[in-house]
Amino acid sequence: MFQFLIFLFPYVIDFKQDDMFFFLKKINSLFIVLLFWANGFAQNNNQIIFDNYEWNFGTIEEVDGSVSHTFILMNNSKKDVTISKIIPSCSCISTNYSHEIIQPGKIGEIDVTFTPSGSVGETFRSLEVFDNEGVCIGVLEIKTFVNPSNRSIQERYFYTLSDFVYASRININFGYLFKNQQITKSFYLANSSSNDISISIDKSQNKYLKIEYPKVLKPNDEKPVSITYLLSDDNFYSTFVDTFYIFINNKKALLPITTKALALKKYDSIPNPPMMRTYPSIGKLNGKKIKSGEIEIYNDGNSNLEIYQVEIPNNAKTNLIVGTIIKPHEKFIVKCEVLNDNEYQINIFTNDLIRPYKELIFK
């Protein structure tokens, strides 16, 4: 509590110098900090914490244009942090954020604007936030249901599956999947022709994946395809990447649909968790036929960081194995070799509560 009073003191001192608008803005910031404090976030000094990681805009009209939301983050670590870049999953997302230093105990803001033009129905988008060391400090998601305007199907759908059938998206990321948890996401199919079109889908081999789809698209129909993951057993620490094709009047579509989910074990909260940090963000490959590269894994937390799973390509090898322990404030140098490949990645699962999964990319 004494630390929080120290944080509060400068705001009280500056009151005489500020106009009412600036003072109210500071009061709002203090209120947000109190929310962080009330939720117990201030008890852990090794994290960058967001007020929430997902925002739902509800139902919006495409014709009404852009909608915005502000995510608040708190630097709950012991070092200065600067947001260096934010990578959105779609060009329909724009961001505005301060490039100034966020000192320990201070908060920052990220303004996110979604432009619904071209979107239809249930829509999900994500953003990766990186600090000045190239480390991803948070993945934010927004979702909404877009009621389309009266533009043509060809103008609103970006992916052409056949001469008259279009898809709203073809890559669907489900994020984390836990035991007995069911996650459903959708995309839309549209028929721009004047005839009925039959739809079928080749069944995925993944027993955890279920697909529901319209068997027929009538003229000008726009109907959802629902995809559901349900992890019903203990198949933890796996990356599910599933690809399937839609058949339109018994003819294979021009583009596949790809889904991705990460199977994890749900961890119990611990008071002093490990915290993984990697450097550089992309490992550089050297050599000719056999290429090698390195990425360092740091544990900035106060308990052991344990490697639960390592997924590598068939033509690669690494010194990082399941069961590797990285002690607090120490590092492990991941050394990799790959044969005849210019780019590849290693997927790792750890007991880091904030980022249990990480892609180590080499190129």
Image: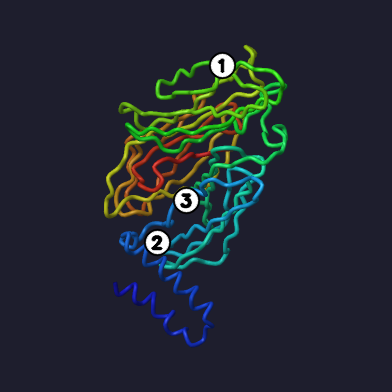
Q: Amino acid at mark 1?
A: Ser
Task: Identify the residue at the far bottom of this view.
Answer: 16
Q: CA distance from mark 1 to mark 3?
A: 38 Å
Depth check, front residue: 263 or 321: 263
When the figure is inspected, residue 250 is found, relative to residue 38, above or below; the finding is above
Between circles 1 and 2, the one closer to the viewer is 1
Q: Secondary structure at mark 2?
A: loop
Quadrant the N terminus occupies: bottom left
Hey, which quadrant is residue 322 in on the image? top left
Reading the chain from its start, which is encountered first: label 1 or label 2?
2
* Residue depicted at x 60% and y 41%: 147
Q: Amino acid at mark 3?
A: Gly
Mark 1 nearby-residue class (10 Å; few <14, some 14–19, many ≥20): some
The residue wearing badge 3 is: 138
Depth check, front residue: 256 or 142: 142
Q: CA distance from mark 1 to mark 2?
A: 51 Å
Q: Secondary structure at mark 1?
A: strand
Residue 319 percent location from the top left of the image: 42, 35
Reading the chain from its start, which is encountered first: label 3 or label 2?
2
Determine whether, in the image, residue 50 is placed left or right of residue 301: right
The residue wearing badge 2 is: 77
The residue wearing badge 1 is: 200
* Residue depicted at x 47% and y 84%: 15
When the figure is inspected, residue 37 is found, relative to residue 282, above or below; the finding is below
3 and 2 marks in contact (CB < 8 Å): no
Hey, which quadrant is residue 363 in on the image? top right
Reading the chain from its start, which is encountered first: label 1 or label 3?
3
Residue 54: image tag: none
Q: Amino acid at mark 2?
A: Ser
